[in-house]
Image (cartoon, helix red, strand yellow):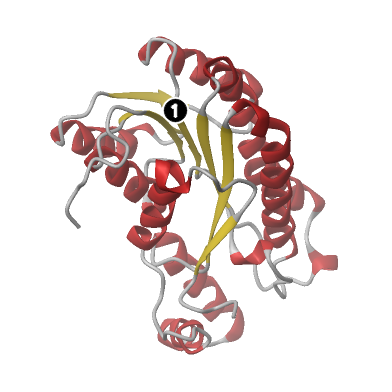
């Protein structure tokens, strides 16, 4: 897709930027003109994505960050303010985890449940907490959270993940109300299952627990989608770009679902 400068001159922070959707979002924002601060726990692949963005002519900083650790996120936000000379235009919260699958709610270990909520909900809240004061002071900003179709409906055998994505959706709507008077848009993109290594791992685990083949599990997902097409990371990145650009200037507290018609 050709670049049109839809976020030209903007400064963007992206969490979970090392792989999959995060990497696609990062490179899409870079192609469209944004400079970037990238955060993730796994630095080597993060550096690879950063270099690809630099090759597109963008200024890029990398910060090792666990988004569920308060001190890490505070340091990340401080690094972003310094790198961007005090101006942060866009925050995209991608970092997250899946947690237990194919497991009835009552069989989930409480520690596993807490880990998913901590990563997905607290890990979305903390970057907002520490970045939004800068946006408030400049009276503008775009926050785009990554939710999921699991936050739009129940999801059998995925209680921890579904609960967390409902939490991200509720957080999005509430912060949109809190921050609207400061000219800050807060929205959420809700992908279905996305064609990434995480999907492969999910299919492998499901196949093992069911006694199926990988292809049987994958095809089951495809047949559940109206378009018979699995969402690609770029599909999600394109939706995030819209929410991060001025094209969505009068949208806040809203969700865009990108799932091939999985949740129709």
Q: Pick the quarter of the image with the C terminus.
A: bottom right
**Left or right, residue 84 beside residue 154:** left
Task: Find the residue positioned furthest to the front.
Answer: 250
Q: Is residue 211 above or below residue 201?
A: below
Nearer-the-camera pick, 169 or 217: 169
**Left or right, residue 40 beside residue 1:** right
| Whole-percent x, y for residue 58 in the image | 21, 29
Nearer-the-camera pick, 86 or 104: 86
Please say whether residue 175 is visible from this viewpoint: yes
What residue is drawn where x is 73% and y is 58%?
160
Nearer-the-camera pick, 109 or 97: 97
Q: Pick the quarter of the image with the N terminus.
A: bottom left
| Whole-percent x, y for residue 193 in the image | 50, 69
| Residue carrying label 1 | 89
Task: Find the residue positioned furthest to the right.
Answer: 106
What residue is drawn where x is 46% and y is 89%?
216
Residue 165, by quadrant, is bottom right
| Whole-percent x, y for residue 260 in the image | 46, 76
| Whole-percent x, y for residue 209 in the image | 60, 78
What residue is drawn where x is 14% and y is 34%?
55
Please say whether residue 245 is visible from this viewpoint: no
For mark 1, does the 10 Å Cα neighbourhood hold few (<14), some (14 to 19), or many (20 or more) residues? many
Residue 199, by quadrant, is bottom left
Is disc 1 placed on a helix, strand or loop?
loop
């Amino acid at each position: 897709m050709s670049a049109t400068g839809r976020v030209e001159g903007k400064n963007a922070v992206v969490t979970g930027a090392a792989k999959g959707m995060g990497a696609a979002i990062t490179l899409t924002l870079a192609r469209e003109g944004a400079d970037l601060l990238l955060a993730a726990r796994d630095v080597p692949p993060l550096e690879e994505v950063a270099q690809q963005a630099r090759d597109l002519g963008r200024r890029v900083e990398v910060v090792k960050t666990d988004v569920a650790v308060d001190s890490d996120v505070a340091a990340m936000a401080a690094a972003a303010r310094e790198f961007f000379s005090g101006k942060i235009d866009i925050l995209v919260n991608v970092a997250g985890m899946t947690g237990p699958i194919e497991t009835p709610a009552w069989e989930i270990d409480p520690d596993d449940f807490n880990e998913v909520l901590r990563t997905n909900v607290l890990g979305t809240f903390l970057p907002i907490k520490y970045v939004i004061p800068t946006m408030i002071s400049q009276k503008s900003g775009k926050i785009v959270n990554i939710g999921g179709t699991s936050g739009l409906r129940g999801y059998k055998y995925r209680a921890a993940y579904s609960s967390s994505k409902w939490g991200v959706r509720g957080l999005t709507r509430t912060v949109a109300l809190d921050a609207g008077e400061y000219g800050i848009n807060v929205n959420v993109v809700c992908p279905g299952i996305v064609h990434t290594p995480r999907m492969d791992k999910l299919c492998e685990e499901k196949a093992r627990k069911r006694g199926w083949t990988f292809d049987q599990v994958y095809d089951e997902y495809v047949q559940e989608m109206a378009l018979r097409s699995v969402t690609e990371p770029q599909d999600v990145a394109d939706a995030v770009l819209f929410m991060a650009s001025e094209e969505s200037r009068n949208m806040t507290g809203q969700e865009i679902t990108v799932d091939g018609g999985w949740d129709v």
